Amino acid sequence: MGKKNKQFVEKITAMEDDFAQWYTDVVKQAELVDYGLVRGTMIMTPYGYGIWENIKNELDKKIKETGHSNVQFPVFIPESLLQKEKDHVEGFAPEVAWVTHGGEEELAERLAFRPTSEVLFCDYYSKNIHSYRDLPKLYNQWANVVRWEKTTRPFLRSSEFHWQEGHTAHATYEDAAAETDRMLEVYADIVENYLAVPVIRGRKTESEKFAGAEYTITIESMMHDGRALQAATSHHFGSGFAEAFDITYLDKEGKSQFVHQTSWGLSTRVMGGLIMVHGDNRGLVVPPKIAPTQAMIVPIAQHKEGVLDAAADIRNKLADVIRVDMDDSDKMPGWKFNECEMKGYPVRIEIGPKDIEKNQAVLVRRDTNEKDFVSLDELVDKVPALLEEVQQNLYDQALTHREEKTTTVKSMEDVEKAIAENPGFMNGMWCGDEACEEKLKEDYQVTSRCIPFEQEAVSDTCLCCGKDAKELVIWARAY
């Protein structure tokens, strides 16, 4: 490897030495984002946005398939409107960014830059829902939101980020519950089958649920360092917001009833999860289904006659079946290889004079670095099949990793040992008392990730207080 190529790789800190710095290095060197002028903001550059756009497009398609329509609401929320739902505003108050002036004139009422849009939708629903015939309202919004985070990190926590937020209104509690469940499954489908990240489905505890919700359900994922990341959530509001905002409808008997609402969201935070689940010390690894470039063609000795023509011919043939590009820049091949690895292209296709003589190309997998020599006549069939293998392997690797870093804990001593020896998910029984939940947080910086839908009794007693256990909880340190 030449000196230039070595320097290129050395720009990434080894994850074993400093995982946080490794993450920052990958985000920057893979050209996913640049830093904005305002603290905690980020510029999503073309490659980073390209990955997000593919996630967004797939999710948007599935949201519409479930009967939802996209809408767009304003970014500003009057303070008086935000104050209408007490628990909700208290939950978001520390993170709200306020607009106090319009031009040089001080506003009569402060305006919040939306941290989330529940109150905007509630105000709209209160004016536009009158009869059972108006229900359900199934809306989704793609938007930027602002939350004034104290500690920021690209994708994981930023002062401004992009997401979708679904907001629905239903005639009954049961209809809203079905919607809450349905949308969590949509998220699980996207995260597992497109991002290749296995998730655990479950319910948040009372202290961890969304502010103002009756209950919150979640999909939780494990990062390479064993920490958890909440990938997406779905919230059942019951009639709480409807009562605060007087959202009523006349049922079939002509009686006035409160609607029952939901909201659910997935954000660019999953980009951080993607990096921390699949990335390695050579850079980013992007699952083929969401990769902007699924295969990058690298011509070898491209100055020699016929090489660029052969590479272009491969690109033209593959363009009908995959997202393919060609690096015909004047960089050295070794540099191009490193760049392919850094950006995590699922497959690299090498073609040089010797390959042309043998009517072959070299396929290199990003996930395993394995090479395969394939006839040029078979590429159109072989490359898509290889991409499917890479996609499945990334999921399988992540699932194996999660299983290896999951420990059963039956006492606080077990928790301490697991954190020291095998940090990751901890399956432990809980009595249901928030005091025990708080003690784990205070003593070990461990939070309840979810009460998994698939329950099993790993012990009869609470791991914290020793009293009779109520349910199994997934515990972990988290981002």
Image: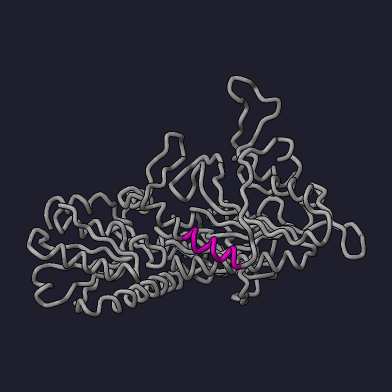
Identify the image quadrant of residue 377: bottom left
Q: Which residues are magenta?
A: 55-65
Identify the image quadrant of residue 325: bottom left
Q: Nearer the viewer, residue 431 or 370?
A: 370
Q: Nearer the viewer, residue 288 or 221?
A: 288
The mark tally for this picture is 0
State the colouring used for the structure image. Answer: one colour
Query: Does the magenta run of residues contain 204?
Result: no
The answer to whether any part of residue 327 appears in the image is yes
Q: Residue at x 92, y 61 (%)?
A: 254
Q: Residue at x 38, y 50 (%)?
A: 20
Q: Residue at x 46, y 34 (%)?
A: 38
- Counting from the top left corner in percent of width and height, residue 180 is at 67, 64
Q: Is residue 309 left or right of residue 254?
A: left
Above or below, 407 against 381 in this view is: above
Q: Nearer the viewer, residue 40 or 378?
A: 378
Q: Quadrant of the N terminus?
A: bottom left
- Counting from the top left corner in percent of width and height, residue 24 is at 36, 48
Identify the image quadrant of residue 69: bottom right
Q: Is residue 60 left or right of residue 207?
A: left
- Counting from the top left corner in percent of width and height, residue 54 is at 44, 60
- Counting from the top left corner in percent of width and height, residue 162 is at 51, 49
Above or below, 68 against 390 in this view is: above
The answer to whether any part of residue 374 appears in the image is no
Q: Main secondary structure of the magenta part?
A: helix
Q: Residue at x 33, y 58 (%)?
A: 284
Q: Is residue 208 left or right of residue 1?
A: right
Q: Is residue 378 left or right of residue 113?
A: left
Above or below, 189 against 326 in this view is: below
